[in-house]
Amino acid sequence: MRVTMISFTISGCQLGQKVSRGLTKLGYDTKQFTKSAHTMDSDAVQVQEPLGKWTGKAFEDSDAILFIGACGIAVRSIAPYVKDKKKDPAVIVIDERGTFAISLLSGHIGGANELTGIIASIAGAQPVITTATDLNGRFAVDVFARKNGCYISEMKYAKEVSAALLAGEEVGFYSEFPWKGELPRGLVPYQKGEKKPKLGIAVTPSFQKHLYERTLYLVPKILALGIGCRKGTSMETILGQVRKLCSELMIPEAAVKQVATIDIKKEEPGLVAYCRDRNFPLICYTSEELLAVEGEFTESEFVKKQVGVGNVCERSALLASSIEISSKKTNGKLIHGKYAGNGVTVALAVEEWSVNFE
């Protein structure tokens, strides 16, 4: 997590140094700035440009921003840049004496509430958290989604879930995956055939199941997309074939973690451009690695003569979805086999995964 901090006085600069060192020990990537003319031998970089301009840059390249000074300074500085709670960085304020650490923006999704507690512990400050679910000790769906790496389908329903739980109402819960820990108070597990709440949460990589009148989908990023293609296939053609498959399965792009293929395609212009455009890592395997994947696959003799293995998309998707759990390799599972068209073959596999309430 990238944390950018700025101070305005000598005392603030000294406190920033203390917080920066503490966060760095915990694995955070920190950058310290100051508007003070005196850095007191700290690592802080003096800021010469207007604070508003500095804040705009920090909004673009930081996961969290810490203002060491007055709340008013922070509020005025960030006001022009606050746009979307799904994307805005966490913003925290701590006074220069380290008395109070305040979670100001993106408390849940951005992680400001959690980071505020950590900063308060380092500085010896009192953490100030104002979000209702935290104050009342209730389940916060946006915090849960962030910690489990899930995409929130609709913020409107996320707000309704929080409101319902705060009002003491029950909210349904369905998961295609096992979960660790106890189900939080207010969530009712889905039971087929039993009466269910009108509002519910569904943890699934697909929008196919409509389990409640109003369903909040939480989509984990756990799918591997295996792709094979002819030489010279364009990015648009690859994108079109992937979209056709995902549309049929009602799978959002947010569920895709990475793209996999055979190593001779690692510099295929259309495939490389597709991954770059969609911000997907491209994982490449040798024909020997793909041949070693166990299972039944839709083989092609023509493809085998060309690249040494009769099926690229299914084997590469399965291999990419294999993960290590407790030093043991666990294979993924194909959720859709070879899907061919326009010189492109696509397959989808899901890695072993579980929901974590702990």
Image (cartoon, rainbow, N blue to C red):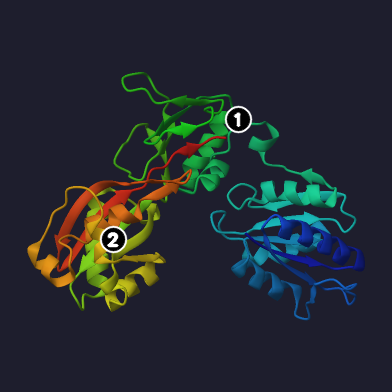
Which mark is first along the chain, 1 or 2? 1
Disc 2 vs disc 1: Cβ atoms closer than 8 Å? no
Mark number displayed over residue 155: none
Identify the element where label 2 is drawn.
helix
Q: Is residue 153 visible?
A: no
The amino acid marked with disc number 2 is Glu
Viewer-closest of 63 and 198: 63
Query: For residue 196, which quarter of the picture?
Result: top left
**Residue at (36, 50) in percent of width and height:** 322
Q: Where does residue 176 sit, x and y in percent of width and height?
A: 36, 36
**Residue at (74, 46) in percent of width and height:** 117
Viewer-closest of 214 and 353: 353
Placement of 177 over or under 315, stated as above or below:
above
- Few, some or many residues within 10 Å of mark 2 (<14, 14–19, 20+): some
Label 2 – label 1 distance at C-alpha? 52 Å
Viewer-closest of 331 and 229: 331
Mark number displayed over residue 289: 2
Q: Is residue 54 visible?
A: yes
Residue that badge 1 annotates: 166
The amino acid marked with disc number 1 is Leu
Single out the mark in the foreground, 2 or 1.
2
Q: Where does residue 145 sit, x and y in percent of width and height?
A: 51, 44
